[in-house]
Image (cartoon, rainbow, N blue to C red):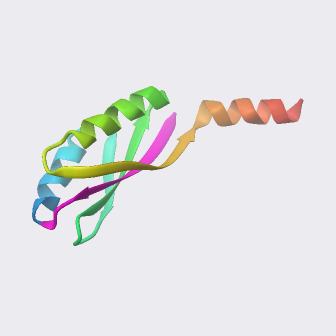
Amino acid sequence: MNVSSIVVKTLPEHLHEVIDSINAVDSCEVHFNDADGKIVVTIEGESIEEQMKKMKQIQGLPFVYDANLAYSYCEDELSEALDRMAK
């Protein structure tokens, strides 16, 4: 399982509409927002490619003017790195 966090920005007057649109995207969840229009979202996926596709989908939502990756955790990559370190 891979998890990424993105920060989405919108205008305050569109905040609730954008949050509803993000929550409608499969495997995406809003965790925090502020009155200035910043929204913190997590995206789960089987691969980084799947997560990037979902991020691009969010970037294309109406009233979203910015969406950037803040954090990414890839379980398989971590396991592979730990295996290499153990050798």
From this viewpoint, which residue is outermost toward the bottom?
Answer: 35
Q: Nearer the viewer, residue 77 or 64?
A: 64
At horizontal 18% and vertical 42% (from top left) the residue drawn is: 61
Q: Would residue 76 appear left or right of 20 to someone viewing this image?
A: right
At horizontal 10% and vertical 65% (from top left) the residue drawn is: 13
Secondary structure character of the magenta stretch overall: strand
Tell me if I can see residue 22 in this picture. yes
The image shows residue 42 at horizontal and vertical percentages of: 39, 48
Residue 36 in the image: above or below residue 70: below
| Quadrant of the image occupied by residue 10 | bottom left
- Tell me if residue 9 is in the magenta stretch: yes
Counting labels gives 0
Residue 74 in the image: above or below residue 39: above
At horizontal 32% and vertical 42% (from top left) the residue drawn is: 28
The image shows residue 76 at horizontal and vertical percentages of: 62, 30
Residue 54 in the image: above or below residue 32: above
Quadrant of the frame with the C terminus: top right
At horizontal 23% and vertical 64% (from top left) the residue drawn is: 37
The image shows residue 5 at horizontal and vertical percentages of: 43, 49
- Tell me if residue 50 is in the magenta stretch: no
Residue 31 in the image: above or below residue 46: below
From this viewpoint, which residue is outermost toward the right?
Answer: 87
Q: Would residue 14 appear left or right of 76 to someone viewing this image?
A: left
Which residues fall within the magenta stretch?
1-12
Q: Would residue 74 appear left or right of 45 to someone viewing this image?
A: right
Tell me if I can see residue 26 in this picture. no
The image shows residue 81 at horizontal and vertical percentages of: 74, 34
Q: Would residue 64 appear left or right of 52 to someone viewing this image?
A: left
From this viewpoint, which residue is outermost toward the front?
Answer: 65
| Quadrant of the image occupied by residue 54 | top left
